[in-house]
C-alpha cells in the first residue's frame, strides 16, 4: 500500500512563487549555473565523448545540451532522488493540489511503466515529483521517448546510455533544429517591456516586441518567446526560438531552459 508523503504534498499546496519575484533567476541559478558545473560538464564530456558523439550524431542534437541536461537533472548521475516514486505519485494523484490532474496521469503512466518493466511499483526511487534517473524522466516521458540504447531489452532511466539517448530522442522528436540558436539576448533602455508577460508560454510577434522598446538582431523567426531573467541588480531579456520552446516542454520553466542554454555554451 502506498504511504502518504506530507513533504511531497506540501510542495504543490503552498502558494506558487511569482515568476516575476525579485531575483528569481539569481536564486535559481546560484547553485546550477556556476563554475563547478562548467568544470564537471567539461570532464563528463571528455570521459564520455565517444558515447555522446554517437548519440548527438544519431539524433542531430548538440552534445553540450545533452550534457547540460544530465548536469542540471542529476548532477551527472550522482543524485537520482530518494523518494519512493509510487508513494510520491499516489500522494499527488489523490490528495488535492494545484497539479492533481497531471499527477493522476503520471501515476497511470508509472503503473504501466512498472508493468512493462515487470517490476514492483515499490522498487523505484526518484524525485518528489516522480522523475527518474539520469535526466529525471517522468514516467510518461520514458514510455513515449525512452530508448534502449545499450540493447539490453529495456529502456532504463538509470542507465547512462539509455537516459542520454532518451533526452536526445525527446529533443529530436519535438523538432530540434541544429541550424537555429536557442535564444538571443535583447536590450531595452527602459522598463516598458514589463507591460508584456514573460514566461515559457508567452510568445509575441517581433514587431510587438520592438514596439515595447526591445532591441535585438539576428532573430530569424516571426515570433519569439519572451524570457526575462529577473536578477537582484538587473534583469536579462532573452528571446527564445522554437528550440527554446522544446526545452520548456521538458520542464515548463524559463529559468530551467536558460540554465541549460548557459551551461551548454560555457564549455
Image: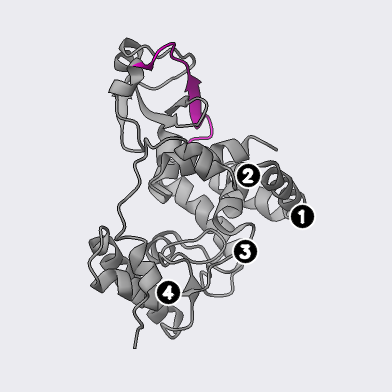
Disc 4 crowd, CA 10 A, few/some/many (<14, 14-19, 20+): many
The residue at which mark 3 appears reads as: 160
Q: Residue 223: which quarter of the image?
A: top left
Q: Position of residue 182 (x, y in %)?
A: 50, 32
Mark on residue 47? 1
Q: Earlier in the sequence, mark 3 or mark 1?
A: 1
Q: Earlier in the sequence, mark 1 or mark 2?
A: 1
Residue at 48%, 44% in the rendered image: 256
The residue stretch that appears in magenta? 177-191
- Name the one closer to the observer, 22 or 252: 22
Q: Position of residue 265 (x, y in %)?
A: 63, 35
Q: Is residue 187 above or below residue 223?
A: above
The residue at which mark 2 appears reads as: 63
Q: Earlier in the sequence, mark 2 or mark 3?
A: 2
Disc 2 crowd, CA 10 A, few/some/many (<14, 14-19, 20+): many
- Name the one closer to the observer, 159 or 105: 105
Mark on residue 85? 4
SS under mark 4? helix
Disc 3 crowd, CA 10 A, few/some/many (<14, 14-19, 20+): some
> With 161 as the anchor, is 87 left or right in this view?
left
Q: Is residue 156 above or below residue 185?
A: below
Residue 187: within the magenta? yes
Residue at 39%, 22% in the rendered image: 221
Marks 2 and 4 sit apart, C-alpha to C-alpha, by 29 Å
**Do labels 4 and 3 touch, CB within 8 Å?**
no
Secondary structure that dominates the magenta span: loop
Amino acid at each position: 500500500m502506498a504511504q502518504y508523503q506530507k513533504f511531497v504534498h506540501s510542495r504543490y499546496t503552498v502558494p506558487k512563487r511569482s515568476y516575476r519575484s525579485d531575483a528569481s533567476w539569481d536564486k535559481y541559478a546560484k547553485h546550477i549555473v556556476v563554475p563547478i558545473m562548467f568544470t564537471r560538464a567539461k570532464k563528463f564530456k571528455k570521459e564520455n565523448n565517444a558515447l555522446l558523439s554517437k548519440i548527438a550524431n544519431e539524433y542531430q542534437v548538440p552534445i553540450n545540451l545533452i550534457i547540460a541536461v544530465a548536469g542540471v537533472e542529476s548532477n551527472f548521475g550522482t543524485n537520482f532522488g530518494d523518494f519512493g516514486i509510487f508513494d510520491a505519485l499516489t500522494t499527488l494523484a489523490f490528495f488535492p493540489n494545484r497539479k492533481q490532474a497531471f499527477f493522476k496521469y503520471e501515476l497511470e503512466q508509472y503503473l504501466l511503466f512498472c508493468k512493462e518493466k515487470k517490476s514492483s511499483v515499490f522498487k523505484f526511487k526518484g524525485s518528489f515529483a516522480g522523475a527518474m534517473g539520469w535526466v529525471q524522466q517522468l514516467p510518461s516521458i520514458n514510455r513515449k521517448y525512452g530508448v534502449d540504447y545499450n540493447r539490453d531489452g529495456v529502456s532504463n532511466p538509470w542507465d547512462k546510455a539509455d537516459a542520454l539517448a532518451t533526452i536526445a530522442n525527446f529533443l529530436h522528436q519535438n523538432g530540434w533544429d541544429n541550424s537555429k540558436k536557442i535564444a538571443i539576448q535583447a536590450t531595452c533602455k527602459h522598463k516598458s517591456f514589463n507591460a508584456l508577460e514573460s514566461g515559457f508560454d508567452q510568445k509575441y510577434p517581433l514587431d510587438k516586441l520592438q514596439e515595447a522598446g526591445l532591441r535585438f538582431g539576428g532573430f530569424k523567426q516571426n515570433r519569439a518567446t519572451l524570457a526575462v531573467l529577473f536578477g537582484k541588480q538587473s534583469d536579462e531579456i532573452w528571446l527564445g526560438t522554437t528550440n527554446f520552446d522544446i526545452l520548456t516542454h521538458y520542464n515548463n520553466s524559463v529559468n530551467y531552459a536558460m540554465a541549460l542554454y548557459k551551461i551548454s555554451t560555457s564549455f
